[in-house]
Image (cartoon, rainbow, N blue to C red):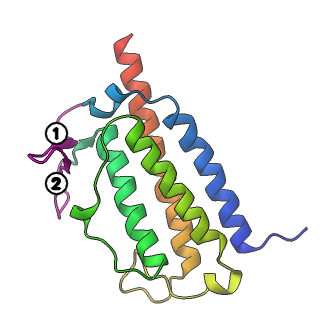
Amino acid sequence: MSTSRAELLRWQFDLTWALTEFHLAQLTPADFGWEPGRPCWTMRPDADGGWVADFAEVEPDPVPVPTIAWLTWHVGWWWSVTIDHAQGRTPRDRTEIAWPGPGAPTIDWLRGLRDEWAVVSDRLTDADLDAPAPFPWRDSPELTVAHMLAWVNTELTKNVAEIGQLRLLRAASAG
């Protein structure tokens, strides 16, 4: 049986999403704001009832430890912008990506992004995968849409592993 590159990338994404669901299902609203150390990046309430991410254009040294809130915003940010690029839409600015807040609103948002990404990736053929990637590389025309899908899978795996580790550390520290 032969597996196309598109099918292989989708299989890898589904495997990654299974890990994502494992951790999302375990999260409580209180997990999102737990600060595991200093310096720390998190989501802060703004004057309008929304949320603002701690962020710096140049990563500070030492790198701040993120909260689950910040990590879920970060996933929503890069994934939303990647979907914009893949759909041929003008990508939104980082500040236009609204984090829904702790608990179910963010979990539902991430699941919605997963559904959007599935539609985008399922329509791709192996020929589409050879086109230049619109994102996240700006000056690397040799990188293709296949690379972009592999990057999404890797970035999601990394972020979900961080979320899972923070969730486990918080649970262990409470006991």
**28 up-or-down from 134: above or below:** above
Q: Which residues are magenta?
A: 37-62
Which numbered tag is attached to residue 60? 2
Which percent across, then down, holds residue 50?
Answer: 20, 47
Near-viewer residue (119 or 164): 119
Near-viewer residue (25 or 168): 25
Point 39% across, 43% down: residue: 106
Looking at numbered disc 2 in the image, what kind of residue is underneath it? Pro
Q: Give the prevailing secondary structure in the magenta stretch.
A: loop
Crowd rating for badge 1 (residues with CA inside 10 Å; few <14, some 14–19, many 20+)? few
Q: State which tag comes first along the sequence, 1 or 2.
A: 1
Which percent across, then down, holds residue 1?
Answer: 91, 67
Near-viewer residue (32 or 64): 32
Confirm or deny contact between disc 1 and disc 2 (CB under 8 A): yes
Residue identified by numbered label 1: 39
Splitting the image into 4 quarters, where does residue 8 fall? bottom right
Which numbered tag is attached to residue 76? none
Which percent across, then down, holds residue 42?
Answer: 22, 42
**121 up-or-down from 54: above or below:** below
Number of on-image labels: 2
Q: Residue furthest left?
A: 47
**111 up-or-down from 134: above or below:** above
| Distance from Cα at disc 1 to Cα at disc 2 | 10 Å
Q: Quadrant location of the C terminus?
A: top left
Point 60% across, 67% down: residue: 119
Question: With 137 as the anchor, is 70 left or right in this view?
Answer: left
User: Dot 2: what SS?
Assistant: loop
Residue 109 located within the stretch drawn in magenta: no
